[in-house]
Image (spheres, rainbow, N blue to C red):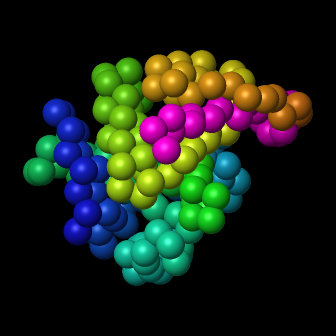
Amino acid sequence: MMTLKGDSIYLRALEPNDLEFIYAMENDQSIWEVSNTCTPYSRFLIRQYLENAQQDIYEAKQLRLAICQDEDFPAVGLIDLFEFDPKNNRAGVGIVIQDKEKRNQSIGSEALELLINYCFHNLNLHQLYANIAVRNVASIALFTKFGFEKIGIKKDWILLDNQYQDEAIFQLINKQI
C-alpha cells in the first residue's frame, strides 16, 4: 500500500473500507461544484471503482489518494491526479476536504505539498495543472501558495445555479527537469 507521510497527515491508497466515506463524498451536493459531479453514485458503482482503484497510474491514467490525519481515523478528504499523461509528463490535480470544519487547518496544504513532491520526484512529471472556478477563492489561494500560476480563463465554462461561471487554469512547472 502506498503511503506518503507528512507532519500531521498522510496520503494513502484507497482501501475497500473507504466505501462509505467515498459514497458520502460523491453524494454530497455541496461539493459537486469542485468535483464536476452532477449525479449521485450508488454503493455498487463505488465498490466496483474501489476494486479497480489499485490499478497502476500508467494504466488507469489517474490516482486517487485518501487524506488521513491519524492511523486510527478514516479519511478526511481526497486528492487526485487525473489525465495523467506520461508522454508529456503532466497531470491534473484536484483536492477536496469533506468536513467543512476540517478546512482551513492546513490539511489541504500539507496534502498538496506531499502530492507535488511525489509527482516531481517519483513520477518525474514536468508539470501539474488545476482547473478552479474563479469564485473558489480558497482553492485559488491554496494552489498559488505552492507556485501554481494562472495561465488562462475559460469563459462561461461551468453552469452553477443556472448561471455560467468562469474557470481558471493554473499550472506549476517543475523547474528542476
Can the viewer see residue 78?
no
> Which residue is found at the position 67% from the left and 39% from the top?
131
Magenta-drawn segment: 157-177
Nearer to the camera, 151 or 77: 151
Q: Position of residue 78 (x, y in %)?
A: 41, 49
Query: Magenta includes 138?
Result: no
Q: Quadrant of the N terminus?
A: bottom left
| Identity of the residue drawn at 11% across and 51% down | 72
Q: Is residue 174 magenta?
A: yes
- Nearest the camera: 64 or 56? 56
Is 87 left, or right, of 155 in this rendering?
left
Whether residue 6 is visible here, answered yes or no, is: yes
The quarter holding residue 23 reads bottom left
Kindly identify the residue that appears in the image at 35 percent across and 55 percent down: 122
Along the line of sight, the residue nearer the viewer: 164 or 64: 64
> Measured along the vertical axis of the image, is residue 174 above or below residue 83?
above
Vertical relation: 137 (above or below) 126: above
Asked whether 123 or 71 is in front, the reply is: 123
20 over 101 or under it: above or below: below
Residue at the extreme left: 72
Left or right of 160 in this view: 91: left
Tell me: residue 2, above or below residue 94: below
In x, y percent, where is residue 11?
28, 50
What residue do we see at 84% from left, 34% from top? 154
Q: Position of residue 95 (x, y in %)?
A: 48, 42
Horizontally, is 76 left or right of 44 in the view? left
